[in-house]
Amino acid sequence: PPFVMAYTLKPGISFCHVAGRTIFLDLRADRYFCLASDAERSFGRLAAASSRAEDMRILEGLTHQGILRAGDTGSVLQPCPAVTEVRASLLDAAPMPVRPLQTLLAGMALLRAPLRLRLFGLHAAIARVQARKARLMSIGSERETLAHAAAAFAQLRAIATTHDQCLPRSLAVAERLLAAGVQAELVLAVKLQPFAAHAWVQWHDLVVNDRVDAVRDFTPILVV
């Protein structure tokens, strides 16, 4: 019979399954990682509530590494939930008129996001988005507000480089949309063979700040 052990993920740790492997994200350490094969098997049995006595040593080791912590007997280890499959990108939408103030606010957000990441780290940046989302007072014209905000950031793509900047750029877009009352989602995702990480902002089935082809091969590992 399974040997019952109660563990849960340590706060700041999330995971997803990609190409037969389990990929983890540690927000506090700002790193993605996999487990050794024996540890990955033990973790898989733990998540499936089918742990064995021989898994105990490995799972205790994962607690010492800061991946797991002792939890309630009802604890369930769940991978990051999937987001709505994207259907279209706002970058492909018809051009929208953008007021200078919207462009200014978008530009300021683009300047602040990488600075905050460097100063305070990924965990603090994600916590900021989560806190802002928890306080959000949604508006009735989300779609229109979203389109104008997305157009402002799209206008800045010509003057603000996007190379290796998907995370700070997506943080900036998410914060501006939340400030405007739009219930957008910040998505951090990964793929294997070779490993790559990506980030984008999504509203229902629309990608706000990227192309559909650029995100469809990635599996979400954290959705805020």
Image (cartoon, rainbow, N blue to C red):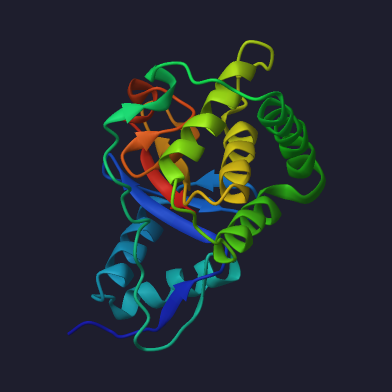
Asked whether residue 178 is in view, the answer is yes
Residue visible at 64% across and 38% down? 172
- Left or right: 222 with respect to 218? right
Near-viewer residue (109 or 169): 109
Q: Residue furthest left?
A: 1
Name above or below for residue 205 compared with residue 71: above
Q: Position of residue 12 (x, y in %)?
A: 57, 62
Residue visible at 57% across and 50% down? 178
- Quarter-wise, where is residue 18 in the image? top left
Q: Position of residue 149 (x, y in %)?
A: 56, 33
Name above or below for residue 152 compared with residue 28: above
Residue visible at 66% across and 16% down? 161
Residue visible at 56% across and 65% down? 134
Near-viewer residue (152 or 60): 152
Q: Position of residue 194 (x, y in %)?
A: 41, 26
Q: Residue furthest right?
A: 119
- Left or right: 118 with respect to 25? right
Name above or below for residue 208 compared with residue 137: above
In what quadrant of the picture does the N terminus appear?
A: bottom left
Near-viewer residue (140 or 93): 140
- Quarter-wise, where is residue 157 in the image? top right
Name above or below for residue 144 compared with residue 69: above
Asked whether residue 35 is in view, the answer is no
Q: Position of residue 86 (x, y in %)?
A: 30, 35
Total numbered circles: 0
Q: Residue furthest bottom?
A: 73
